[in-house]
Amino acid sequence: MAETDPRRRIPRTDRLLALPEVARASASMGERVVRELVRAVQDRARSGQISPEQVEQELLAGIGGAGAHSLRPVLNATGVIVHTNLGRAPLSAAARAALQDASGYTDVEFDLPSGQRSRRGAAARTALLEACPAAEDALIVNNGAAALLLATTALAGTGEVVLSRGEMIEIGAGFRLPDLVASTGTRIREIGTTNRTHADDYRAAIGPDTGAVLRIHASNYRISGFTSAVPVAELADVCHRADLPLVVDLGSGLLEPDPVLPEEPALGTALRDGADLVIASGDKLLGGPQAGILLGRAEVVARLARHPMSRAMRADKLALAALEATLRGPEPPVPAALHADPEALRTRTTALADQVGGQVVAHEGRVGGGGGAEVPLPGWALALPEHLAEPLRRGDPAVVGTVRDGACLLDLRCIPAAQDVDLARAVRAAQGAGAAQEDA
Ligand SMILES: *Cc1c(COP(=O)(O)O)cnc(C)c1O
């Protein structure tokens, strides 16, 4: 390094750690966290994003906004509502308040009036049954995958579940549902073909080893053309004649049909059509916390609850509290974003353009998270220069848009209107950061 190399002016770690604010932060949130922050700011100076003289100020700003955890709040400007990389469903204000209340000691498994132990999560269960009257009982576990595993293990054990080849899906990077089911020793009896499966295929496959028939909603892709699947009502009839339960994994968690997503099957519908057990995630279209939701016939739910594996999958008190509040409280952000009025989105996007520049362009949102595959949600985006995408992601709050055709597109569908001011401020900060770098 030459004597004139500006990197030589980057303050040393020990000097930064000795600053009074930094030392105080070390004491309150732990030295490891603070050392990470120090290293990150030094790295930004090394790579020329900030000058060595800015290191101290940036570190103090970072410490001011940091806590003992590293997850950062994000403004989701992608237009994808249930974005798995961004934590799926944002919680409603009611659910956030419930998390806060449940975070200390709480009566999750205790009846205060009698002083006796009570059924864990009874209130969340009641809220679910009220929201889905077609179900006799409900069980809440850690996530959708756990719910599926518990259902197949408890009902089929090391026997067989019958599953159509058209429903053997992969739902996330390398995560295959058939592999999950098979992981506890349950055998999958594959039937039909990729595009067509008939009621007779089910009848022929059912035998003494069959513990359940499984229907999995192919959430994130569609088969079209010469296709055929057995409707739930007909499949339930086939199962019940053989005295077998029909388990329907719907993934998305729409409780009742929604006109915006005409193809998306609902839990209530499947139960009324005769399914014995339906499975959904809490943090997809339901718009709640991560949870696996099982609804169905009392006797089937009881079999699952009795299985030893259910203890390893039980929902935590925070999820139970947030789920109840999601179901009982005002409309959560996910359905609000799904039903956002395109004209209102255009008005907000135009107002943002008036403040920060850029061009208002038509932009389609998506449900995401394996719901409403391919259904476009008409809306608008603000098109800004592509180079703003990175400073926006690094900003506070971080803003994640979509980079396409040389532009950074910001879609307001998933941003509450009350946060438009934060978004405008973040865009101006990103524009300022870019200008500062050009000056340097
Ligand atoms: C998303 C999904 C799952 C997994 O649910 P998680 O809550 O992510 O564990 C299972 N089945 C289907 C059909 C899904 O779409």
Image (cartoon, rainbow, N blue to C red):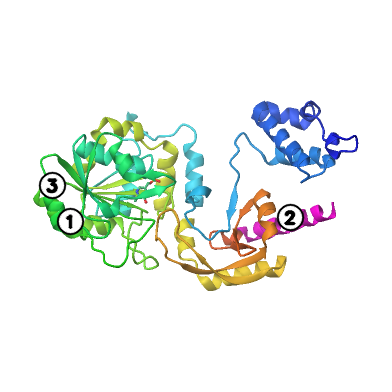
Q: Is residue 3 magenta?
A: no
Q: Earlier in the sequence, mark 1 or mark 2?
A: 1
**Disc 1: residue Cβ within 8 A of ligand 1's nearest atom:** no
Our reading of the magenta stretch's main secondary structure is helix
| Quadrant assignment, res 405 | bottom right
**Disc 3: residue Cβ within 8 A of ligand 1's nearest atom:** no
Q: Give the residue type at disc 3.
A: Ile
Q: Is there a contact, CB below 8 Å, between mark 1 and mark 2?
A: no
Q: Is there a contact, CB below 8 Å, between mark 3 and mark 1?
A: no
Q: Residues within 10 Å of mark 3 (few under 14, many from 20)?
A: many
Residue 323, percent across and down? 41, 46
Q: Is residue 429 magenta?
A: yes
Question: What's the residue at 53%, 59% (across, down)?
Answer: 414
Q: Is there a contact, CB below 8 Å, between mark 2 and mark 3?
A: no
Q: Nearer the viewer, mark 3 or mark 1?
A: 3
Q: Which residue is mark 1?
A: 235
- The range drawn in magenta is 419-440
Residue found farthest to the bottom: 343
Question: What's the residue at 79%, 57% (across, down)?
Answer: 435
Q: Residues within 10 Å of mark 2 (few under 14, many from 20)?
A: some
Q: Give the residue type at disc 2.
A: Ala
User: Of 127 and 264, which appears nearest the observer?
Assistant: 264
Q: Which residue is mark 2?
A: 429
Residue 62, percent across and down? 71, 40
**Tag shown at residue 424:** none
Q: Nearer the viewer, mark 2 or mark 3?
A: 3
Residue 130, percent across and down? 31, 52
Question: What's the residue at 39%, 61% (across, down)?
Answer: 372
Q: Give the residue type at disc 1.
A: Leu
Q: Which residue is mark 3?
A: 206
Q: Residues within 10 Å of mark 1 (few under 14, many from 20)?
A: many
- Residue 282 visible somewhere in the drawing: no
